[in-house]
Image (cartoon, rainbow, N blue to C red):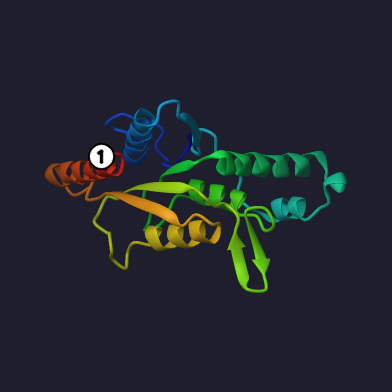
Amino acid sequence: MNILQINSSVRRAQDEQGSVSTRLANELSARLQAAHAGAALNVRDLTNDPLPVLDEEALGALFTAADARTAEQAERVNLSDRLIDELQSADVIVIAAPMFNFHISAQLKNWIDAVARAGVTFKYTEQGPVGLVTGKKVYVVTSRGGVHRDQPSDHIVPYLRTVLGFLGMTDVEFIFAEGLNLGGDAAARGLASARAQIAELTA
């Protein structure tokens, strides 16, 4: 089994004062490795190794023939190629997706923009778009300061279900750590609930 873990919190620390989503994603990946002997883990940290935003230059590189690209354009496309190779090589994807202003972080959006490429990870057909990243199991660990699960304020779950499904990844489990900014008891319950979900999903 190949596991790809995507960390997208703006917090670099992974201790009790740092990123909850990263810490829980680490715990989930460790349990998956323990359950599957020989499982390999590849961690893509989008905060310590940030990706560029999708801009006009990036689009220009993608729409320029390979033999006509400048060195800068070639490097930009090569980065996208490497990220897509990581994704396609994974059997399981663990995404740490904390909520910022009711949505995913800019870091995670940059990753999505880099791997969502027409003709490579999805294609258009007469019957509509078809995702080409198939056969993957995806776990999304999402941490929130408040309580948003199944509420109109939660834009993370519908967005990620849509975009991951668009790319062909339809087997998606969400793990929720909520109420983390609502005081000690609420935060403890939120962490305990998330860890219970992780234990159940990896049993």
Indicate left or right for 130 with 161 as reference: right
Residue 18 x/y as whole percent: 33, 34
Residue 128 x/y as whole percent: 61, 71
Q: Which residue is mark 1?
A: 199
Instruction: Tell me which residue sits at (18%, 49%) in the image.
Output: 182
Residue 116 in the image: above or below residue 124: above
Q: Residue extending furthest left?
A: 185
Instruction: Tell me which residue sits at (66%, 61%) in the image.
Output: 123
Instruction: Tell me which residue sits at (54%, 61%) in the image.
Output: 166
Q: Is residue 51 visible?
A: no
Q: Quadrant of the C terminus?
A: top left
Q: Amino acid at mark 1?
A: Ala
Indicate left or right for 52 with 59 as reference: left
Mark 1 residue element = helix
Indicate left or right for 174 with 45 as reference: left
Instruction: Tell me which residue sits at (83%, 51%) in the image.
Output: 65
